[in-house]
Amino acid sequence: MLKRDWLKLQYTLPSFERIVQSWDTAIKAQSHHDASACLTFGQSQGMSYLLDAQVMRLEYPDLKRACLSLAHQFKPHAILIEDKASGQQLLQDLQRETSLPLLAVSSHNNKVTRFAGISAMIEAGRLSLPQHAPWLAAFESELLHFPHAKHDDQVDALMHYLDFCRKNNFDKLTIRRL
């Protein structure tokens, strides 16, 4: 569904207007289950730069700690978390216990339809990947093999992020950082 030559590599990073994290959370930690994935993006002049990709198999208490740690590390202006399964519990706990800029996201169509909706943004060059990162090959492989890859956790997090940007014209949205 995606061509390799649509993936744009970045050589230098601009200064960012905002940082956004997108989470796709999983319930179980075993290797045969889906993983949780957190993608961190920098936004500048209508472009999205993938800064970090974390894939982890964690039970809920460790997932919550990982979310807090990555939020502390990157200081995002918005944290998108899918509002179902463990993501719902994570949203509730973090809303109650922190002042993080949390936004619940939900999916309405099947994954292939949602991916088709955001693939034009990638083809248009609106997503830039790092030239070198230890996680880059795994991210590209999952993205390029979707929907036939064994796992699609990073793809889900990417779809949440790009769909949110498309629907909300993120250039006009500001979230106060606390």
Image (cartoon, rainbow, N blue to C red):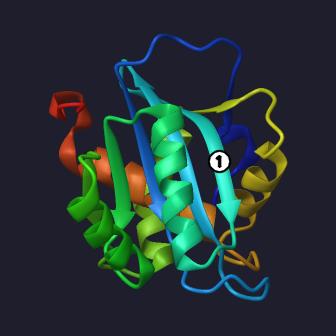
Q: Is residue 26 visible?
A: yes
Vertical order, 122 against 178 (above or below): below
- Name the image quarter holding the N terminus: bottom right
Q: Residue furthest front?
A: 97
Q: Is residue 28 left or right of residue 19?
A: right
Assess disc 1: are there few (<14), some (14-19) or many (≥20) residues with their C-alpha within 10 Å of its C-alpha. many
Q: Is residue 158 visible?
A: no
Q: Which of 130/126 is in front? A: 130
Q: Is residue 68 left or right of residue 12?
A: left
Residue 96 x/y as whole percent: 21, 63
Q: Quadrant of residue 176?
A: top left
The residue tagged with tag 1: helix, strand or loop?
strand
The residue located at (55%, 42%) in the rendering is: 123
The residue located at (73%, 58%) in the rendering is: 144
Q: Quadrant of residue 56?
A: bottom right
Badge 1 is on which residue? 53
- Name the image quarter holding the C terminus: top left
The residue located at (79%, 58%) in the rendering is: 141
Residue 172 x/y as whole percent: 15, 30
Q: Is residue 129 left or right of residue 175?
A: right
Task: Identify which amino acid the numbered label 1 is placed on.
Answer: Ala
Vertical order, 162 against 97 (above or below): above
Vertical order, 123 against 91 (above or below): above
Q: Quadrant of residue 90?
A: bottom left
Q: Which of 131/82 is in front? A: 82
Give the total number of marks visible in the rendering: 1
Residue 36 x/y as whole percent: 59, 69
